[in-house]
Image (tube, grey):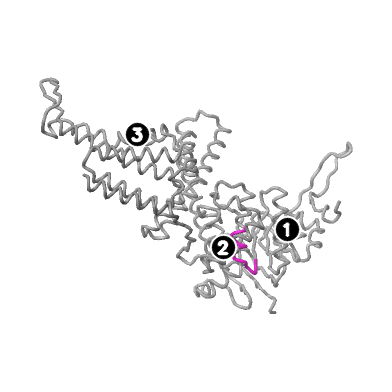
């Protein structure tokens, strides 16, 4: 049940996206394009100060978008060690990055030397990951999921694909609620402690039940679509509207992109 | 003859070719009529409504719609298909099936967009409906966040926006509170007064009298047991009892135990 609640909270909670901060007020299309520019810049930046500047800018944007900084850092730094540290640590040493030695240890007759070049490479790599993960997380927590889906359309992703993703998102909640109800029903009849063999049976039965329920739902939803005139290609109401603020933001980010490119 | 919308002759349907759902159904539905289909669970009501909406097709028998035969082939003609979908709207029993878009607003405008209506016209209809149903606050919400009554209202709105001539509703008041039921019934009566044909399936006898010029009673043998004016059907307690639509209810009153059929329709006949 704890895992289900976590899934519900992490997938469906949109408290920051619904907030009234700076990033939330931008047109999602403009926001997605500018964040893509930031991430591209982070990936190609070779200078450590430029990466620190971009990471600082990301934290500043989080602040002006009324995101709790503690929550934001926790959310981003959970992933960074996974992606970066395990790759960056070996790069510190002379074995992989030969150069000017900064510190040396003698462990069981083997000399381990951290080099200046190795340190620079490791910091660059970690900052790249930190900044790009932070920009990606900031985009997702300041934009409603449905708007993110709509944004996919501007990248020429086929409508049927976007619609299928939207439906998956819509019905995951229904299935999560069904699983929750089933577990409550089991708990009310057999208590919390279940023999592992019965547990396996219950899980298997649940998987089979969900599978058959999703097949039935699939058929019914398709009929509901047909009934309202669906002919194989979904048409949607495009309601994005850009304001002067969006264009100013886009222009500023493009200018910043060029300045950093020129300086580095 | 011009007034005839649906004409069914000796219609049979079975699921997977072996589980009968309808057996020898004959019925006629005229323009502007209020028709109710009543029967216990599993008597074939939903199957009939889906056949009327051209979502499934009969194994045997004839289904006519405004003088044309309804079959799978005719829906391959995009012109007919679009015309039919504009004329006939269907509200599903389970609103979760009907509300498949990420937001309420997208769900409501889905139908007219597929049917090629102008965007300005869609926005105009949406504004009118939202005001009439009082669902403005729900538009940007996700369907899974709504209560059952709200889902039901939105599902009805998503069909009404097409402005169909025929409105088919599968148990529109199932599982909702009395006030929301009242709102929905008032709305449907209003639609009928404006000229729409309303076909409702239900086993909620409270609404049958208001929602019916003609009532068809379905039995567990998947056949029409009886049809006629609502008053005649609702007064036939033996018929209702034999088809699981009423039960014998006993309760204590003035210190004595009474037993009588549980109808709950007396207040329609004796207001106040």
What is the quadrant of the C terminus of chain A in the image?
A: top left
Count residues near mark 3 (Cα–Cα under 10 Å), then give few for <14, some for 14-19, many for 20+.
some
Q: CA distance from mark 1 to mark 2?
A: 24 Å
Pointer 2 residue: B123
**Which residue is at 62% across, 50% downward?**
B150
**Which residue is at 61% across, 46% downward?**
B147
Disc assigned to residue B82: none
Q: Which residues are magenta?
A: B156-166
Q: CA distance from mark 3 to mark 1?
A: 56 Å
| Residue B212 located left or right of residue A106 | right
Pointer 3 residue: A77
SS at mark 2? helix
**Which residue is at 51% across, 41% downward?**
A179
Q: Position of residue A166 (x, y in %)?
A: 46, 53
| Residue B98 located left or right of residue B175 | left
Marks 3 and 1: CB-CB under 8 Å?
no
- Magenta residue check for B165: yes
SS at mark 1? helix
Q: Name the chain under label 3.
A: A
Residue A235 drawn above or below residue A14:
below
| Residue A171 located left or right of residue B207 | left
């Amino acid at each position: 049940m704890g895992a289900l609640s976590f899934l519900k909270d992490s997938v469906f909670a949109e408290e920051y996206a619904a907030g009234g901060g700076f990033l939330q007020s931008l047109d999602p299309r403009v926001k997605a394009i500018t964040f893509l520019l930031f991430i591209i810049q982070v990936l190609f930046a070779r200078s450590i100060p430029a990466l620190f500047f971009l990471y600082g800018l990301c934290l500043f944007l989080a602040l002006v978008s009324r995101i709790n900084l503690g929550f934001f850092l926790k959310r981003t730094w959970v992933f960074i060690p996974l992606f970066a540290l395990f790759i960056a640590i070996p790069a510190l040493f002379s074995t992989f990055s030969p150069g000017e030695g900064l510190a040396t240890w003698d462990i069981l007759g083997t000399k381990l030397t951290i080099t200046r070049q190795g340190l620079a490479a490791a910091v660059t790599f970690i900052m790249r990951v930190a900044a790009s993960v932070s920009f990606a997380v900031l985009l997702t927590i300041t934009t409603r999921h449905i708007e993110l889906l709509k944004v996919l359309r501007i990248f020429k992703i086929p409508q049927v694909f976007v619609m299928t993703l939207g439906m998956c998102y819509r019905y995951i909640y229904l299935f999560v609620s069904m699983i929750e109800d089933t577990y409550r029903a089991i708990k009310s009849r057999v208590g919390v402690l279940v023999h592992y063999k019965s547990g396996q049976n219950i899980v298997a039965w649940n998987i089979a039940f969900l599978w058959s329920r999703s097949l039935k739902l699939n058929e019914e939803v398709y009929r509901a679509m047909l009934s309202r005139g669906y002919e194989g290609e979904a048409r949607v109401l495009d309601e994005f509207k850009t304001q002067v603020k969006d264009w100013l933001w886009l222009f500023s980010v493009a200018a910043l992109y060029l300045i950093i490119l020129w300086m580095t | 003859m011009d007034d005839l919308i649906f004409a069914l002759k000796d219609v049979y349907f079975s699921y997977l070719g072996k589980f009968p759902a309808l057996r020898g159904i004959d019925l006629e539905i005229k323009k502007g009529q209020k028709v109710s289909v009543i029967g216990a669970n599993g008597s074939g009501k939903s199957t009939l409504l889906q056949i009327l909406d051209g979502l499934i097709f009969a194994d045997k028998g004839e289904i006519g719609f405004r003088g044309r035969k309804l079959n799978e082939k005719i829906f391959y003609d995009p012109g007919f298909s679009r015309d039919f979908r504009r004329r006939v709207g269907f509200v599903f029993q389970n609103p979760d099936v009907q509300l498949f878009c990420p937001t309420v607003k997208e769900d409501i405008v889905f139908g007219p967009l597929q049917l090629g209506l102008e965007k300005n016209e869609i926005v105009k209809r949406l504004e009118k409906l939202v005001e009439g149903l009082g669902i403005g606050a729900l538009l940007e919400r996700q369907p899974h966040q709504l209560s059952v009554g709200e889902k039901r209202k939105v599902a009805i709105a998503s069909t009404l926006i097409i402005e169909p001539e025929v409105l088919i509703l599968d148990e529109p008041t199932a599982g909702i509170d009395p006030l929301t039921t009242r709102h929905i019934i008032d709305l449907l009566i209003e639609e009928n007064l404006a000229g729409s044909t309303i076909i409702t399936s239900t086993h909620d006898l409270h609404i049958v009298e208001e929602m019916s010029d003609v009532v068809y009673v379905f039995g567990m043998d998947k056949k029409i047991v009886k049809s006629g004016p609502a008053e005649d059907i609702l007064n036939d307690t033996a018929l209702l009892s034999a088809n699981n639509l009423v039960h014998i209810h006993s309760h204590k009153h003035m210190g004595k135990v009474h037993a009588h059929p549980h109808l709950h329709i007396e207040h329609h006949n004796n207001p106040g």
